[in-house]
Image (spheres, grey):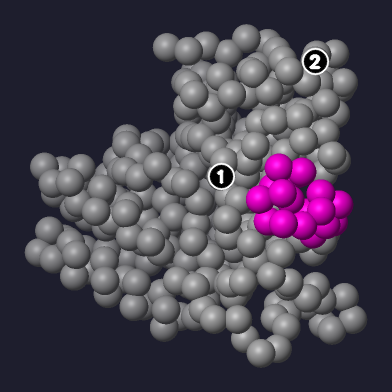
């Protein structure tokens, strides 16, 4: 999925004044380090040595990516249901009520990944709770607070171990 | 089954929003928790071996990187073939997550969920075409739900 490096520096979305110019180092970090981050005392140094740059350059490039929101973080990914129990919840909310209900739901600490989607079921979010009893309590409490019914679609099976996503970015 | 102790949980909480961008990130976490860096690393290695941590790495923001078209594709697949077909769908390189979830009849007939990401509507349409062809006659109906607004995105990256 990799395209050849374009002749002009790539910028995304932001106006010129504060746009981040994506360098080959940014691209390598985005594409090649979505897993196997070293569990060693100087992980960024290890990455730097692998890429033939300085540790400072790696840290500074990751800070750039983080500040401009091109990465959400560098850290562990936890599979579903490893820490507590979770479910995907769908709700069908009349458009004029959507913002109110979405705000009520997002305010809850158990709620993660709350999305508006184009469908009769227009509100989708993940609930994570300490155990099944707590999860059901939160579902009941949302039904009661919002006045709309939750549709709970808990995971039955996950089909593919998510090892990162191959980004279509310019390569070195 | 592997069970986490309080120290493991403290490490997970301390790292869920990311490792510090400092030369010795595990040392930084260790100091916050009153542990040694070696202890933090060995516990994280153990949690990774046990599958509590799936991977550790850079977490790209797909939307910001140009993947504006994020579709949740949902399919109605006969139960007797969902495992076999789910594996195939999950292995497509444009599918980031692929799950079997329960139907909720009559209002929700779909039992296979696959998240797809593209830089254009045409790219996602093409992905859906590939999936339709793969599923063939086993596809008893599908829909694509695009996200129009991200209302909250925090905490652990769990798929739910």
The picture places residue B85, in percent across and down from the top left corner, at: 20, 51
The residue under the point 9% across, 64% down is: B137
Which chain does the residue under circle 2 lie in?
B
The picture places residue A44, in percent across and down from the top left corner, at: 75, 44
Q: Secondary structure at mark 1?
A: loop
Which chain does the residue under circle 1 lie in?
A
Residue A118 seen in the current view: no
Residue corresponding to mark 1: A35
Tell me which corner region of the image, top left, top right, bottom left or bottom right, holds residue A28: bottom right
The picture places residue B144, in percent across and down from the top left corner, at: 38, 66
The residue under the point 13% across, 66% down is: B136
The residue under the point 62% across, 9% down is: B5
Q: Quadrant of the N terminus of chain B?
A: top left
Residue segment shown in magenta:
A44-63
Question: What is the C-alpha distance between the residues marked 2 and 1?
Answer: 24 Å
Residue A129 seen in the current view: yes
In this picture, residue B38 sits left or right of residue A27: right
Label 1 Cα crowd, 10 Å radius (few <14 / some 14-19 / many 20+): some
Tell me which corner region of the image, top left, top right, bottom left or bottom right, holds residue B15: top right
Relative to residue A53, is residue A110 depicted above or below? above
In magenta stretch: residue A45: yes
Q: Nearer the viewer, residue B2 or A127?
A: B2
Q: How many marks?
A: 2
In magenta stretch: residue A48: yes
Q: On residue B36, which mark appears?
A: 2
Q: Which residue, as the protein is rendered here, is positioned at the far bottom? A: A7
Q: Is mark 2 in CB contact (under 8 Å) with mark 1?
A: no
Relative to residue B24, is residue B43 depicted above or below? above
Q: Nearer the viewer, residue B129 or B26?
A: B26
């Amino acid at each position: 999925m990799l395209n050849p490096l374009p002749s002009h520096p790539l910028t995304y979305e932001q106006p010129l004044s504060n746009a981040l110019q994506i360098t080959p180092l940014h691209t390598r970090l985005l594409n090649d380090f979505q897993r196997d981050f070293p569990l060693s005392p100087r992980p960024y140094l290890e990455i730097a040595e692998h890429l033939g740059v300085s540790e400072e350059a790696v840290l500074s490039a990751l800070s750039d990516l983080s500040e401009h929101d091109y990465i959400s973080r560098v850290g562990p990914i936890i599979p579903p249901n490893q820490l507590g129990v979770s479910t995907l919840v769908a709700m069908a909310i009349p458009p004029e009520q959507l913002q109110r209900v979405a705000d009520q739901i997002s305010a809850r600490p158990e709620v993660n990944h709350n999305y508006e989607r184009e469908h009769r079921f227009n509100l989708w979010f993940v609930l994570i709770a300490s155990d099944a009893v707590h999860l059901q309590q939160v579902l009941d409490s949302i039904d009661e607070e919002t006045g709309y019914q939750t549709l709970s679609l808990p995971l039955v099976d996950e089909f593919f171990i998510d090892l990162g996503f191959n980004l279509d970015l310019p390569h070195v | 089954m592997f069970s986490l102790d309080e120290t493991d949980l403290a490490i997970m909480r301390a790292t869920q929003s990311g490792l510090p961008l400092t030369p010795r990130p595990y040392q930084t976490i260790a100091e916050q928790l009153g542990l040694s860096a070696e202890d933090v690393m060995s516990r994280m290695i153990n949690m990774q071996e046990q599958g509590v941590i799936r991977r550790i790495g850079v977490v790209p923001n797909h939307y910001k990187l140009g993947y504006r078209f994020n579709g949740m594709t949902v399919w109605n697949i006969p139960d007797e073939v969902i495992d076999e077909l789910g594996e195939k769908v999950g292995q497509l390189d444009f599918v980031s997550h692929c799950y079997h979830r329960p139907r909720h009849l009559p209002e929700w007939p779909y039992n296979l969920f696959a998240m797809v990401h593209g830089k254009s509507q045409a790219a996602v349409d093409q992905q859906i075409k590939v999936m339709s062809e793969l599923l063939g006659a086993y596809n008893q109906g599908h829909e694509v739900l695009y996200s129009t607004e991200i209302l909250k995105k925090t905490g652990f990256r769990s798929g739910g």
